[in-house]
Amino acid sequence: MTTSYTKDEIAALQEKAKRHLWLHFTRMSAYADNDVPVIVSGEGQYVYDQRGKRYLDGLAGLFVSQVGHGRTELAEAAARQAKELAYFPLWSYAHPQAIELADRLASLAPGDLNRVFFTTSGSEAVESAWKLAKQYFKTVGQPGRYKVLSRYIAYHGTSLGALAITGLAPIKAPFEPLPPGGVRVPNTNFYRAPAFAADDETAFGVWAADEIDRAIEQEGPDSVAAVYLEPVQNSGGCFPPPPGYFQRVREICDRHGVLLVSDEVICAFGRLGYYFGCERYGYQPDIITFAKGVTSGYAPLGGMMVSDRLMEPFGARTVTEPSHGGDAGQQQSWLVGSAGSRMHTSEGPASFLHGVTFAGHPVSCAVAMANLDVFEKEDLLGNVRANEGAFRATLEKLKDLPIVGDVRGDGYFYGIELVKDKATKETFDDDESERLLRGFLSHALFDAGLICRADDRGDPVIQLSPPLTCGQEQFDEMEQILRSVLSQAWTKI
Ligand SMILES: Cc1ncc(COP(=O)(O)O)c(C=O)c1O
């Protein structure tokens, strides 16, 4: 469905956008003499701007729109729920949509990840997991554990706690000092592996995992609460794990009593062909954080899934039969006299001292259920698994361009690293990067009808993460646009 605006409407929106809207992570000065890009509608794998121009959504918005745009069934699920019960909190009460979704996610998640704590976003999910880890260890008599390890260049969100876990120094600097306890370890960028492991991915993985071990030893194991890892690290341009990496990390975490958090804000819900990215690589985390694709963006929702073991001090029942309410008198409920407190299955005195007003919003949960229905009906995981080889092969054709150093990723999640010299892997300096990515590529790709991400938070990369409904037609379109624009870029270096 395309909706074209009149010239006057376009001008009026531009004026208001420039006057009043503040875009995230955006130099607003860039729009002083240029139009703000305004997307007004979407259908399937495509979105449309005010003039009715079509773009292939090669980034699923922002790693979000798994089922694609314009899905009536998700919109209708939202409308139905808003009519039935638009809002009620998960503080002491429950509502059927949160219950049903928690039950469904528990049935999809691997191992003993049975408990869902909802949030509204990925940053909140990441930060909630840290808070849970800290309170958990205090509750079980290990109060010294508060530090979190994460990888260089990894992005885990922007709220202050999540930012402390994020490994991107430039976006942290203005907000220092951040909450203490963030420790960095190497990421799994095999393209830029140290010389001793440059030809052996397995050895590289052993080294990268052992660096986590070394960091825990150095910090003092009794001070470390958790290790945060994405199944495929997004920032830096899609670093998949080397073979055996996660198995070794799991062993290291177990040996030191440290929690393994799989940050799947991007990698869950089909991005890698599985409901959860950890399934693809065969490891069992203690906590999964998720957001984005759980609703395909038709409403905001995030959360964390935790193991029974972590819930124990907070009164988890590990029995499998349905629970029938606990002793409300043992709850620390702030909503005095709320009937909802009777729904708790708690058997202990502790409660997790954390909550968010809109977390597990009924409309978002209803949308998530409808989203998962689409996954099942259309076998979207099957689609990704069946076509990911074709996606990779199509993108790898770009390797014949002098500017393309590496094509890497898994599932429907790829990064293309741009280099100045393929033979030496020499990258661009800051000025070149600025000219190439901000000065040319971002605009040129958009003008050519492809939404993707040109990112230089690590070495310069183009990132692709299209809706899971894509097939060869869209792969070819991406390849053709990239080929043309990257060839032009090479002439501008
Ligand atoms: C791995 C990861 N964690 C956390 C976040 C933060 O999510 P949000 O932007 O919903 O706060 C992101 C966002 O892209 C992410 O990619």
Image: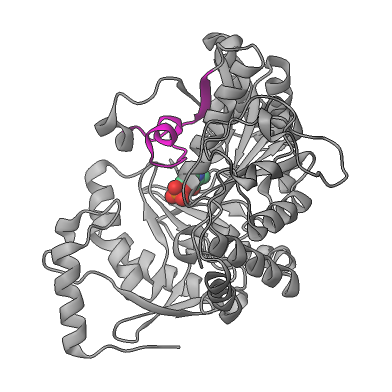
Which of the colour schemes (rainbow, by chain, secondary structure, one colour) is used? one colour
Query: Which percent across, then down, holds residue 61?
Result: 45, 65
- Whether residue 284 is situated above or below residue 279 in the rendered picture: above
Q: What stretch of residues is rendered in magenta?
A: 146-169
Q: Is residue 395 left or right of residue 34?
A: right
Indicate yes or no whether the magenta region holds residue 433: no
Q: Quadrant of residue 95?
A: bottom right
Q: Residue at x 68, y 50 (%)?
A: 276
Decide which of 314, 272 is in the foreground and name it: 314
The total number of labels drawn is 0
Q: Is residue 32 left or right of residue 327?
A: left
Query: Which percent across, then down, holds residue 12?
Result: 16, 79
- Whether residue 123 is situated above or below residue 465 in the rendered picture: above
Quarter holding the C terminus? bottom left
Residue 483 seen in the current view: yes
Q: Residue at x 74, y 33 (%)?
A: 316
